[in-house]
Image (cartoon, rainbow, N blue to C red):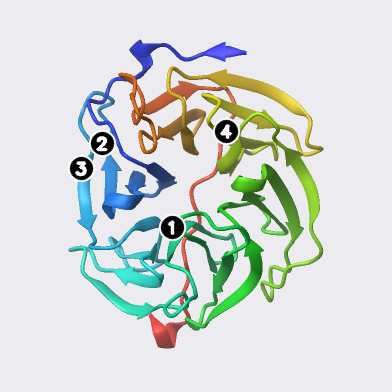
Amino acid sequence: MTDLTPDQILRPDRLELGEGIRSTGSGIVLVDILAGRLLAAPDDPTAPLTELARLPVPLGAVAPVAGRPGTWIAAAGTGICLLAPDGTPSRPARPEDGAPLPMRMNDAAADPSGRFWAGSMAYDADEGAGSLYRVDHDGTVSRVLDGITVPNGPAFTADGTAMYLADSARGIVRRYPVDPETGELGAPEPFVTVDDGSPDGMTVDVEGAVWIAVWGTGTVRRHLPDGSLDRTLRLPARQPAGVCLREDVLHITTARVGLTAPGPYDGALFTARVGVPGTQAAAYRPAPEVS
């Protein structure tokens, strides 16, 4: 087990619910979900985060849109929208409008084939109320999984043939076969079960191992492709929520939400050199007629 020390926490920011951290062609971006904020992390590790957009609804995660610099596809509010470079939302799809329970979008990511996948959950994390949606190249939004309580991820292998999806409230990460041509999912298999916390944000490195932020434990864990535990990083923050790799530096978001007495590093953004690189976050690739 490796401890991250306070001198590895240089930015002044403390986020309420920092998640959705991604390494893109323009650098590191992340969200403060409940505040609806899209943020960028400057290359200077001591500089404060920069706000790119602020929405009046929760913002779960974004992916860049191919061929449109500064434009993002976002899991926001009760569905999906595009965010222009000035932060203006457009083309909203709201599949969770009218649901029996108050719902919001949570984590999301693009796959290597250029589709966008986004999870939804009830505000109160009601059992089985969440779903996973897929946005195809033509902009069609389809519900592909339901009965999830708190979906986190998805994270994809480099070839796009497997997807890891956490149901955080149930303490399990499942691996789904993916058809890169169609986006269809195969039958899942259990990948990791967590008994001492909740698996949250994830990323896959170049060796095919999965880094998992484990909420409630103050740890990030690296699991090999067979699911076995390879390495644990321990943070001085209780609620790790998101991870990404930029080259071989792991960036970790944490959260203060729900803590009656947050510590000085709860909600901070951490970095740690881990010796194995990741890949750049995939972009959503719309068909030419919808771009």
Packing grade of label 2 (10 A; few <14, some 14-19, many >=20) is some
Amino acid found under the numbered disc labelled 2: Pro
Which image quarter: residue 208?
top right
Of residues 246 and 214, the one nearer the viewer is: 214
Distance in Å between CA atoms under marks 1 and 2: 31 Å
At which x and y percent is residue 157? 67, 50
Mark 3 touches mark 2? (CB < 8 Å): yes
Q: Which of marks 1 and 3 is nearer the N terminus?
A: 3
Q: Nearer the viewer, mark 1 or mark 2?
A: 1
Distance in Å between CA atoms under marks 3 and 2: 7 Å
The residue at the point 33 percent across, 25 percent down is 262
Distance in Å between CA atoms under marks 3 and 4: 26 Å
At which x and y percent is residue 10? 28, 20
For this orientation, the residue located farthest to the bottom is 289
Determine which residue is flagged by label 2: 42
In this rendering, the answer to whether 255 lies above or below 116 is: above
The residue at the point 61 percent across, 32 percent down is 197
Which image quarter: residue 8?
top left
Helix, strand or loop at disc 1? Answer: loop
Determine which residue is flagged by label 3: 50
The residue at the point 28 percent across, 25 percent down is 45
Q: Which of marks 3 and 2 is nearer the N terminus?
A: 2
In this rendering, the answer to whether 272 lies above or below 170 is: above
Q: Which of marks 4 and 2 is nearer the N terminus?
A: 2
Distance in Å between CA atoms under marks 4 and 2: 25 Å
At which x and y percent is residue 184? 71, 73
Q: Which of marks 1 and 4 is in front?
A: 1
Distance in Å between CA atoms under marks 1 and 3: 27 Å
Helix, strand or loop at disc 4? Answer: strand
Task: Point out which mark residue 123 bears.
Answer: 1
Determine which residue is flagged by label 4: 214
